[in-house]
Amino acid sequence: MSLWGGRFAMSMNKTFKKFSDSLYFDYRLVEQDIIGSIAWSKALMTVNVLNTKEQQLLENTLNLILKKVSINPEIILSSNAEDIHSWVESQLIEKLGELGKKLHTGRSRNDQVTTDLKLWCKVNIKRLLQAHLELKKKLIATAENTQDVIMPGYTHLQHAQPITFAYWCLAYLEMLIRDEGRLKDTLKRMDISPLGSGALAGTTYAINRQQLASWLGFKSVTNNSLDAVSDRDYILELISNAAIGMIHLSRFAEDLIFFNTNELSFIELADEITSGSSLMPQKKNPDVLELIRGKCGQVHGALTGIITTLKGLPLAYNKDMQEDKKFLFNAVDTWIDCIYMSALVLNKLKINKIRCQEAIKKNYSNSTELADYLVSKGIPFRTAHHIVGKIVLEAINQNLALEELDLNQLRTFSSKITEDVYSILSIQSCLDKRNATGGVSFNQVSHAIEYAKKMLTTSIVI
Ligand code: ARG
């Protein structure tokens, strides 16, 4: 039986019921729904709707239900209940009879569902931060072991300037740190309890909402019930965070797919996370990375889905909002999976130092150094840039690296060039010179790694 059957003369069309029910996806809110219901039962006791014994009985029974489903929440799915809120209530009524029917006093599914969702988001933001911590550890460990692995840095997928593999890892660490910052901001903004908002205009019972909020671990309470039951900003924010986080992971994946090409072979992925071809025996495909890149579509689709669903919705609750959970669960599940998978990729990643180093030979990525050298001899940068362009062209024609051109040849382009030019053309010098904060020099990178390690030990998962 539905929660609201009294007003209806006809029972629900079966096909419509299937279309309308949300239990098959919102069953995942069971724990939050029970926690919220226990807190609500305590609130009802403070306003004498329940006596102590009744509240205790409700609380114990709710805990028993929780115990039963925490082993396997999917057992809920065999029920015919409309949604998780109806399911919990029907379980209570089944077990406690009339007493079970008292719990929904002064509460609406409208404040209940958004309370459950906020509680779910809070738990899952913590899981996301934990996942980030794992990936950060792997990035830092990989960076620590690859400070001497010099490879080309790219712009336009063309060799630009030399970097180290460690430096590449630290770039992704920065992105993760920003992702974490966004998650923590989102958490702060959502930490406000909507429970006690009723259907849309507040509850008629003189409940101390602040106390109720603190039982549920919320910092404060919502100010306007019309907004509180309609607000899904926290879902929008969390999915936006996921969309940005997935952009980072997709770029990480794409870089590694590129490094893994037969042509580059800078890296080799562990067998345990690659797969073969049914036809071509030689293949070892980077499926894991392609999936991380591909699953971006799921998360970006979820973002489009939720913003489109909420756009133009009148206040307050509308059934459209029931769909929010599909987007939320899909985005968060996918993001967490992809973070852990990225950590797994780094776990046994082999980095081919020799291949990386070979790639920077004769790639003219020390051209900027030569221009800077001419600047140090008093030539304006733009002129120096032009001279070096000509030297590069000549070197390409002769199939030589810049440092392989002899001094006489170099001097035909500028008489300012002297023997000391060769020391600045070395790749090591290219790296060492970039010693300003954030640069690729060994000093900067090792400081960044030390700092990151320190941050890891003090990093608090809230
Ligand atoms: N299953 C519903 C949802 O997730 C619960 C809220 C129902 N509220 C209502 N007024 N019909 O949105």
Image: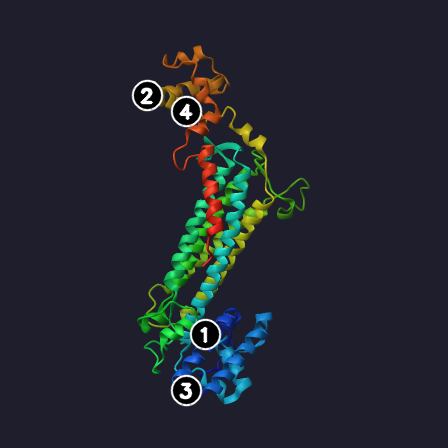
Q: Which of marks 2 and 3 is in front?
A: 3
Give the residue at x 52% y 48%: 137
Query: In the rendered view, how is the structure colored?
Result: rainbow
Mark 1 closeness class: few <14, some 14–19, many ≥20 residues within 10 Å: many
Q: Can residue 1 be spotted in the picture?
A: no
Cα separation between marks 3 and 1: 17 Å
Q: Which of marks 3 and 4 is in front?
A: 3
Left-right relation of 135 to 227? right
Ligand 1 occupies quarter: bottom left
Cα separation between marks 1 and 4: 64 Å
Residue 119: image quadrant is bottom left
- For residue 274, above or below residue 209: above
Q: Which of marks 4 and 2 is nearer the N terminus?
A: 4
Residue position for label 2: 383
> What amino acid does circle 4 point to?
Glu
Nearest the eye: 460 or 377: 460
Q: Position of residue 77 (x, y in %)?
A: 57, 73
Residue position for label 3: 49
Give the residue at x 51% y 78%: 88
